[in-house]
Image (cartoon, grey):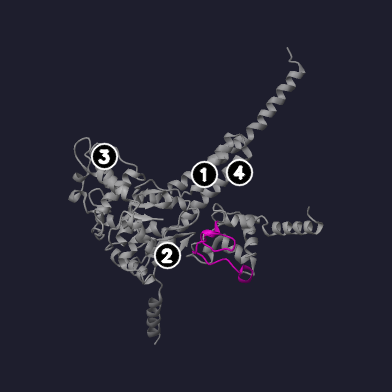
């Protein structure tokens, strides 16, 4: 027979566990989806496995890209800034919609 | 005084004039620049090792390659190819009748520019031409029969140094240029050129796969690829690279693909035949 | 002899209904034709994307299943992809020369 305090403790632990293993955001799903952003193929991102290294690791994003528009521009068409880039132009070539890019940027700002 | 100033400024402008896009060097000079680019970028890699592709890119990978070579996964293909090569056609002739030196130890001379037909002849194309000339149906360029034949022919040529020639014929140079253009042109929804991965990103990895340097990249063909659990001809590799960047592939052994093979193999001249190869 | 009114109203409702149904199918036919033409052009230029072909295929499948709104959307998407691939080919003309290792 479980005591009331033990019961409360268990409930609290369960709530904490649920919060910690919360479902990935829409942006995270898009970023890790091979058919969408597929970011891990070239970038190391916390929470993702077996990343590639064609591009820099995506960390400290808020500090490195304080201007959101800059990050959106890079994902949309990095060839504008760097004609030699190997980064696909996700907006220009209609790989991602603008809404999807926004969601990914939201996610990246948590990294 | 004014004339002197004018003269000086024209000379200065000429000195700092950026190289025009049209200023392409001849193939010999481009060959040297290509080789120097990779040897200076990867100074620890002995020149001949470049033919091992991703395995040449670091010591740990090289050890992996050596272990694989002890029980080569392409052995079955070589054995099958040897059998196929020896078996006569219905008309009594054999593959040996189609090739110099009976087809043994000649891989390093392919592809070549055939001035008679005005096109690049690759080993795969030559094999099917041989079949058709002798009343046999051609093999699929992307499947195991072709892979077995080319695996055997590569195996008999191991160690021989690639010696691709560009004859003094404007059509041959044009084929080289078309292959070169293809190699450096972006394509597919993902916007990659061959150079994006095999020049700019050589030695880096996409997910866990290390990208091979373009120098000597044809030397190990055909390859056994673990990812495919089987053999892959040059045609299979070219078409699959295209689809990976979401570009509709050309038909196998399309003239443009043969031009690419011509350009790339020429760039690897002097390196040893290492095929058939094993890759992740 | 005049048809009974009930029969006439049924007939006219049926005709109206058939006209309303025909429009989306026609919309799809038009959209698909445009997209297919663009896709074929990109193939002729050797700049076709696999995604263009796949999207066209999906558009046809949706239409075959009677999902015309979805089919039209997909057909229009395929056309956009085909046009983008043609633009890519145009932009890339001559661009390779600067990239040659020197």
Q: Which residue is mark 1?
A: C54
Image coords of residue A39 (percent x, y): 55, 59
Q: Which residue is mark 2?
A: B203
Residues at marks 1 and 3 touching, judged by CB atoms closer than 8 Å = no
Please identify the quarter of the rendering in which residue A71 is found: bottom right
Image coords of residue B250 (percent x, y): 40, 48
**Label 2, label 3: how far apart the Cα atoms are:** 41 Å
Question: Residue C73 has which mark?
Answer: 4
A107 lies left or right of B54: right
B98 lies left or right of B274: left
Disc 2 with disc 4 on a shared chain: no
Q: Residue at x 36, y 69 (%)?
A: B37
Q: The residue tagged with tag 4: helix, strand or loop?
A: helix
Q: The residue tagged with tag 2: helix, strand or loop?
A: loop
Q: The residue tagged with tag 1: helix, strand or loop?
A: helix
**Label 1, label 3: how far apart the Cα atoms are:** 35 Å
B277 lies left or right of C82: left
**Label 3, label 4: how far apart the Cα atoms are:** 47 Å
Q: Residues within 10 Å of mark 3 (few under 14, many from 20)?
A: few
Chain at tag 2: B
Q: Which residue is mark 3?
A: B132
Chain at tag 1: C
Disc 3 with disc 4 on a shared chain: no
């Amino acid at each position: 027979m479980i005591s009331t305090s033990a019961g409360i403790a268990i409930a609290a632990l369960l709530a904490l566990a649920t919060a910690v293993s919360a479902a990935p955001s829409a942006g995270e799903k898009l970023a890790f989806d091979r058919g969408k952003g597929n970011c891990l193929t070239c970038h190391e991102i916390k929470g993702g496995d077996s990343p590639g290294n064609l591009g820099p690791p995506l960390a400290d994003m808020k500090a490195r890209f304080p201007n959101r528009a800059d990050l959106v521009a890079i994902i949309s068409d990095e060839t504008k800034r760097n004609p030699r880039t190997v980064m696909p132009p996700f907006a220009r070539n209609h790989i991602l919609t603008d809404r999807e890019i926004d969601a990914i940027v939201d996610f990246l700002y948590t990294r | 005084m004014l004339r002197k100033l004018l003269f000086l400024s024209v000379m200065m402008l000429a000195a700092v004039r950026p190289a025009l896009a049209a200023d392409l060097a001849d193939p010999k000079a481009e060959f040297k620049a290509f080789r120097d680019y990779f040897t200076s970028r990867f100074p620890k890699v002995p020149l001949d090792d470049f033919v091992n592709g991703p395995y040449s890119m670091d010591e740990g990978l090289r050890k992996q390659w050596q272990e694989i070579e002890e029980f080569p996964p392409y052995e079955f293909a070589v054995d099958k190819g040897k059998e196929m090569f020896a078996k006569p056609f219905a008309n009594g002739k054999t593959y040996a009748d189609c090739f110099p030196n009976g087809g043994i130890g000649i891989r390093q001379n392919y592809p070549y520019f055939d001035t008679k037909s005005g096109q690049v002849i690759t080993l795969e194309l030559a094999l099917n031409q041989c079949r058709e000339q002798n009343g046999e149906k051609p093999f699929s360029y992307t499947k195991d029969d072709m892979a077995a034949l080319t695996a055997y022919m590569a195996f008999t040529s191991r160690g021989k140094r690639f010696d691709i020639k560009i004859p003094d014929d404007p059509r041959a140079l044009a084929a080289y240029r078309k292959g070169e253009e293809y190699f450096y042109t972006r394509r597919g929804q993902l916007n990659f050129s061959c150079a994006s991965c095999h020049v700019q990103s050589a030695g880096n990895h996409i997910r866990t796969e290390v990208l091979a340097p373009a120098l000597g990249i044809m030397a190990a063909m055909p390859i056994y690829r673990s990812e495919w659990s089987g053999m892959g001809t040059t045609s299979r590799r070219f078409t699959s690279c295209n689809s990976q960047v979401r570009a509709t592939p050309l038909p196998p052994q399309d003239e443009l693909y043969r031009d690419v093979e011509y350009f790339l193999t020429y760039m690897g001249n002097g390196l040893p035949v290492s095929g058939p190869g094993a890759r992740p | 002899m005049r048809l009974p009114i009930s029969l006439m109203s049924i007939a006219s409702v049926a005709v109206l209904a058939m006209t309303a149904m025909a429009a989306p199918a026609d919309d799809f036919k038009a959209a698909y034709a445009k997209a297919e033409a663009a896709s074929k052009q990109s193939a002729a230029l050797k700049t076709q994307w696999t995604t263009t072909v796949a999207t066209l295929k999906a558009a046809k499948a949706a239409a075959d299943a009677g999902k015309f709104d979805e089919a039209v959307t997909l057909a229009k998407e395929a056309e956009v992809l085909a046009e983008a691939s043609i633009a890519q080919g145009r932009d890339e003309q001559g661009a390779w020369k600067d990239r040659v290792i020197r």
